Image (cartoon, rainbow, N blue to C red):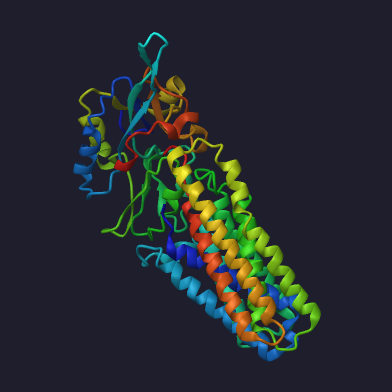
Amino acid sequence: MIDLNQELVFVMDSSRCIGCKTCMIACKDKHDNPVGVSWRKVLECTSGDWAQAPDGSYTQNVLAYYMSVACNHCENPICVSVCPTGAMQIVENGIVAIDTDLCVGCGECRWNCPYSAPVLDRAKKHMTKCDMCRDYLAVGKLPACVAACPSRALTIAPRKEAVAKLGRAEAAPLPPSGLTEPNLCLIKHRDSLSVSKSAAVLANREEF
Amino acid sequence: MTYEYPLVFFTVLGQLAAGIALLICLTGLQKHPAEERRAWIVSLATLAVAGVSAFFHLQSFGATPFALSNVGSSWLSREILLGAIFFVLIALRVWNVLKAGTNWLVGIVGVIFVLVMSQIYAQNAVAPLWHSWGPILSFLGTMLLLGGTAVLALAPDAWERPAVVAGVSSALVGGLFALSMPIFWVGGVLSPLNPVLLGTFATATICVTLTQMTCFAAGGVLTAFGVPGKRMLAQIGFVIILVGAVVGRMLFYAANIRLGG
């Protein structure tokens, strides 16, 4: 068990993820989020086609893989710098969290976040987002999404070591990591596509 | 596609207010105190409506006083600060606390307000169709177009020829800039954006830009015929151009097609 009182990253092993969305459900359940407010998303990436050969046979290069993504508590969190009221803050251990008393719900953070992580909760009248379950971390428990993952595709790890070893997540359908330097490490699926194809492969856009 | 109606009206009306302030200065409207005062009142009222409209974009108001607390890095904070300063300056002109000699200052603050407003979109790297010089040119263009036609509609019946030329020139240049946004979108579509969304957006761009051009042309013709003493025609022309600007701004907000999705 790692020390949870330090800067952490989410590590997503895309080759293990089966797209079951247990992480999403665990997150919604823990934070009691209403319909339409999902802090964690499981992106379904699909690509490829079938081609008919001259002899009448078919070949295919279709592929599919999943990626579980929430707020990545970035090194350069653009949401913090664009927030007009200072509601978006970097708190203990590099976690990016919202001071809900200061949030006016202008949505500027969501507009600028490459991962669209902040989500407006219309009932609460402010933006909401993943805080890495900082209350759980404080008492030595894993974030709800990590604890719930049945295939252990989603884990957390010490930030510096994991980023040095795995780099920051860079694969479709994610945007280029250079925008905000996300604290998300990715073990790529064998069929992972380049970020330059990011928009072409997201198959479940309507879920978000 | 989403339009963010409160922001559509906030930005268009904010640019109209700034355009009037600038054109009062550029056309020398202060030579006609009654018309100048009326123009300042219109500018102030327009900015007030713009501000009220912006409030509808927010979800809660309790923390709005803190919206100026991040001026160091947030363009939205800067926009609110500049908007407030601009509003106070116009109010001071309406009540003649500031004299006509300070019109240039109010005009410049209005232009800075519009420039800062445009940066909120131009600096957004996640929306490639915004992340360019397009919002800057388009917002400044709308300011010049609406300001030019508004002062022509508010001008005295026998306005000096150089002042009319300044108003018409501003409107023409502004109209071209305001219509320039699709040129920047050609570059933006090279980014890895969703092809289905881009296809829908391209169709909308053609339809809306043609509508916008029609409004600008029809409004421009009416304003041109109305300037020599037929103020009602010029005012109808201005309203048609304003409608064109609002329609164009709706398309601008629909251009928020994001990387990674």
Q: Is residue A55 above or below residue A96?
A: above
| Left or right of residue B228, residue B218 in this image | left
Q: Is residue B19 visible?
A: no
Q: Is residue A30 visible?
A: yes
Which residue is situated farthest in the top direction here? A55
Q: How many marks?
A: 0
Which residue is situated farthest in the front direction here? A55
Which residue is situated farthest in the bottom direction here? B34
Expressed as whole percent of the image width and height from the top left, the position of residue A145 reads: 25, 34
Residue B236 sits in which quadrant? bottom right
Q: Quadrant of the N terminus of chain A?
A: top left
Q: Is residue B39 above or below residue B60?
A: below
Expressed as whole percent of the image width and height from the top left, the position of residue B140 reads: 64, 62
Residue nearest the observer in this picture, B56 or A87:
B56
The residue under the point 23% across, 49% down is: A35
Expressed as whole percent of the image width and height from the top left, the position of residue B60 reads: 35, 64
Expressed as whole percent of the image width and height from the top left, the position of residue A90 reads: 42, 45
Residue nearest the observer in this picture, B3 or A141:
B3
| Left or right of residue A38, residue A172 in this image | right
| Left or right of residue A177, residue A62 in this image | left
The residue under the point 29% across, 20% down is: A16
Residue nearest the observer in this picture, B166 or B237:
B237
